[in-house]
Amino acid sequence: MDPIYTASALSTGDGRNGHVRTSDGTLDVDLAVPKEMGGGGGALNPEQLFAAGYAACFHSALRGVARQSGATLADDSVTAEVSLLKQEVGFGLAVVLRVELPGVAQDVADDLVAKAHQVCPYSNATRGNVVVDLDVTVG
């Protein structure tokens, strides 16, 4: 398959206590280990960046699925909670996607979210590797 788009980011310094910059310079930030993990906090961390990307990507997929099905969404939102997990060997991730679809019937909302989960690139990338829980509320 030919790529539609390729993003590139460079990490320098000390990884989680370093710096990351995209090739186009639109993201250019310091990183810090969160206080909860014994670090100083006060800057972004990889889990926050992943959560932001997943929330935006899933929301876009949800909006696309809704348009295709003729559903009207208003005041909808997606919150991605990304947890870092200690595993037997190394670390892993777990995700909760909290989707709010005010004014949509629960069965319709559940169907839209399930369909979005099938087309979202982040969902497809994590499937089978990361536990992703879907929490859908309608109002």
Image (cartoon, rainbow, N blue to C red):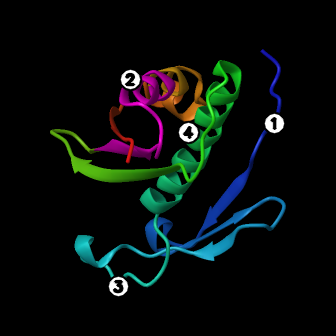
Q: Is residue 79 left or right of residue 95?
A: right
Q: Which residues are magenta?
A: 92-113
Name the residue carrying label 4: 58
The amino acid type of the residue labelled 4 equals Phe
Q: Earlier in the sequence, mark 1 or mark 4?
A: 1
Pick the quarter of the image with the N terminus: top right
Residue 107 is marked as 2
Please determine whether, in this image, residue 1 is positioned above or below residue 31.
Answer: above
Disc 3 versus disc 1: distance between alpha carbons?
A: 35 Å
Q: Position of residue 8 (x, y in %)?
A: 74, 50
Which residue corresponds to the image point at 58% horizontal and 43% vertical from the top-left? 59
Q: Earlier in the sequence, mark 3 or mark 1?
A: 1
Residue depth check, mark 3 versus mark 1: number of the one nearer the observer: 1
Disc 2 versus disc 1: distance between alpha carbons?
A: 34 Å
Label 2: which secondary element: helix
Label 1: which secondary element: loop
Q: Position of residue 91 (x, y in %)?
A: 28, 46
Disc 3 versus disc 2: distance between alpha carbons?
A: 44 Å
Which residue corresponds to the image point at 54% horizontal and 56% vertical from the top-left? 52
The amino acid type of the residue labelled 1 equals Tyr
Residue depth check, mark 2 versus mark 1: number of the one nearer the observer: 2
